[in-house]
Amino acid sequence: MTQPVSDERQTNTPVICTAGVDGVVVRFADTLSEAANRAALAFRAAVEAAQWDGVQETSSSLVSTFLRVDPLVVDHDLLVNDLRTLLNSRDWYAAGLPEGRRLWRIPAVFGTDLAPQLAQAAAQAGMSEDEGVASLTATRLRVQTIGFAPGQPYLGTLPDAWDIPRQSQLTARVPEGALAVAIRQLVLFSVPTPTGWQHVGQTAMRLFQPEAPDPFLLRAGDEVQFTPTTPEKLHRMRRDPKGGATVTVIG
Amino acid sequence: MSEGIKVLSAGPGVTLQDRGRPGWLNAGLSRGGAADPQALSEGAALLGHSDDLPALEMAGMGGAFVAQTDLRLALTGAPMQVTLDGERLAWNASHHWPAGARLSVGGTVSGGYGYLHVGGGFMGHAQLGACSAHLSAGIGRAVQAGDVLAVRRDLGGPVGLALPVDDRFNGGSVRIVESLQTHLFAQNERERFTTTTFRRDTRGNRMGLRLVPPEGGFHIDSGRTILSEVIVPGDIQITGDGTPFVLLCECQTTGGYPRIGTVLPCDLPIVAQAPAGAPLRFRFVELDEATAAERKAASARQTLVKRLRPLIRDPHTIPDLLSYQLISGVTAGDDDTGEKEDKDGTVN
């Protein structure tokens, strides 16, 4: 049931798949691209606006939109038809980014015992440690999706050199605020977690604050640039829930 | 209103759980809630109240609790050793819990998660729309010695009832549907997966649990470069070394390891409750069959009360037999006046 409903397998043609008994995924590409990411964000907003019966929740991942449905209410074939009609109503790959986006400048310590995998990750990317840090801080990255853990961004896209795989063995635990790299992306971890990504930087950012009026700092579409700092300065920034980050509205 | 139960001691995995907090998936927060939602429905049926009230979930080990006021209690989920002021209590049953009486809940006999319900439900502290502790997200905390868990006013209902349940506490066979990457596994890998009897590893928690394959792990060619995509509870994720993990209620919301299948929600309690070493087998079903199974399970949950029956007790083990009979007599005499003070109504 999970094979694509249509035979459209070429890049930039959306496919509809089931995810469990109560989920449907609309995937806009097999690989990450700017256009597919925009399409996933915009399509999710359109599904939310449609307010279909039995759709209980929606989310977007890097290149896909997810609908959680009540399988006892929703007829799967009818839902797929509705999704097809909505897909055909416009060119989702040409969609703009969400409004109210912000630029975050986030201090991070690269390497040292706070982020012990910088050297090996840089080596896999064919760089020295210094070159690695320069590369990771030169680029303005976008929050392509929030996921895995509460408020946790996937940031991209990094230069080709960072197309390095996840580790086959998990790191048992990286701390809150850890910055980790794989497959041309950075993840900024919002809770301590095991991971297959390589821990190259450490921030003092608290991305999820359950008691705060607005519990989640970052939103999909926001932009992020990291600035190198020292362990001593980072330690002082831990008193700030934003971890010393500055934020400006960009559109 | 602030009276409830005093916690004298608690195991490391005792938390308040309700049906979780749906609606935050796009912010990266999974629903959480009871690891075995079926146990919430069973407790609600036993106490005659709504099944979205918080209960105390006890992972592996319970604790010692004293009622500060007269309460009703129900025990569901993984059976655990339990006594009330030294007297053994039946599991999957409802009981009186007089003020000052000490409830001692030990380790699980089988299964992983036992549940303590009180009439009226625990008060809890709602955050983002639910009381459930979601420890991996940093919401709430585990219950500790010294805590007082406030209980909402009990509108009354029965005690002395038993609810027979099917065994879901020793592993078994569970149904799965194909998932986002099932087709990336070769046919013979899928067949090997469904003909394998796995053992639940000792590593596991509310986020998910590891399966031990008796032979080698499972692989696809492009296993480590799949784009991160949505994860749902029940997904069976194959990590880089080929080990399957079944994701549970408190799982991550996205993941980049391939999913070979997804456990049906109505069968997921069998996985969540499987104790370390228990056998687990997986069988693919089509979406239509899965939907029918969900419909049947939902119907069974809604009619749980029909399966209630009087708790059979050996009179010799009831030290206050006379008072039980007295209460029954009083209740019978009040029948004309409706349900007032039904709080003490007891069937046996």
Image (cartoon, rainbow, N blue to C red):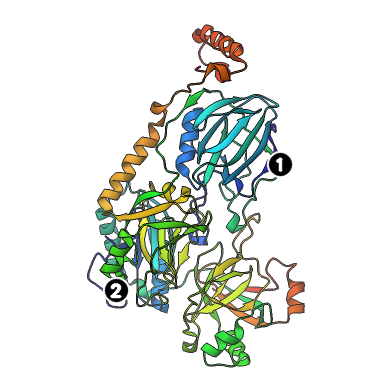
Identify the disc placed on residue B68: none
Out of B193 and B57, give the one closest to the viewer. B193
In the rendering, at what x and y percent does residue B119 appear?
A: 57, 29
| Residue B207 in the image: above or below residue A248 | above
Q: Please give left or right for residue B79 compared with residue B1 in the image.
A: left
Asked if one can make out residue B178 in the rendered structure from this viewpoint, the answer is: no
Out of A89 and B98, give the one closest to the viewer. B98
Residue at 22% of width from left, 70% of height from top? A7
In the rendering, at what x and y percent does residue A96 appear?
A: 43, 73
Q: Please give left or right for residue A111 compared with residue A83 in the image.
A: right
Give the chain letter at badge 2. Answer: A
In the rendering, at what x and y percent does residue A50 appear?
A: 37, 55
Give the chain letter at badge 1. Answer: B
Identify the disc placed on residue A13: 2
Q: Is mark 1 on a helix, strand or loop?
A: loop
Residue most extreme to the left: A7
Count of all numbered marks drawn on residues in the image:
2
Q: What element carries label 2?
A: loop
Q: What residue type is labelled 2?
A: Thr
Identify the disc placed on residue B147: 1
Residue at 51% of width from left, 21% of height from top? B313
Q: Which amino acid does label 1 sit on?
A: Asp
What is the C-alpha distance between the residues marked 2 and 1?
56 Å
Q: In which quarter of the image is residue A207?
A: bottom right
